[in-house]
Amino acid sequence: MDFVKIGSFNTRMEAETIGHALDQYDIPHLVKLDDAGGMLVQMLPGASLWVPEDKASEARQLLACVLPSQDTDEGTDTAEPPPDD
């Protein structure tokens, strides 16, 4: 299953909060930390939110309702989901 990035957030908590909202609509999600595996926590705070490609449009619509000023990524990034921790 290919996942696409639908948004970038300043903190992991922000991304997780939006992800939990997506759970209410049965949209699976992954939060990918932008910290180089924990090596750059101070330098690169933030996280991105990924959903299955076939759910991306619905997820972006919901994201726009919750965070109207949030810039959503238009699906330029496609990848296999990151490995489970």
Image: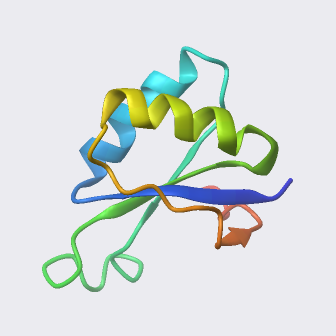
Q: Quadrant of residue 28?
A: top right
* Residue 16 falls left or right of residue 31: left
Q: Quadrant of residue 16?
A: top left
Most extreme residue toward the right is 1
Colour convention: rainbow
Residue 38 drawn at (x, y percent): 32, 76
Q: Nearer the viewer, residue 3 or 68?
A: 68
* Residue 1 falls left or right of residue 61: right
Q: Nearer the viewer, residue 55 or 80?
A: 55
Q: Quadrant of the C terminus?
A: bottom right
Can you say whether 54 is above or below 7 in the image?
above
**Residue at the spot 77% in from the left edge and 66% down from the top edge:** 80
* Residue 72 in view (yes/no): yes
Residue 84 drawn at (x, y percent): 64, 56
Residue 17 drawn at (x, y percent): 33, 33
Q: Nearer the viewer, residue 37 or 81?
A: 81
Most extreme residue toward the top is 24
Most extreme residue toward the left is 42
* Residue 82 falls left or right of residue 53: left
* Residue 19 in view (yes/no): no
Can you say whether 20 is above or below 7 in the image?
above
**Residue at the spot 65% in from the left edge and 72% down from the top edge:** 76
**Residue at the spot 73% in from the left edge and 70% down from the top edge:** 79
**Residue at the spot 26% in from the left edge and 43% down from the top edge:** 13
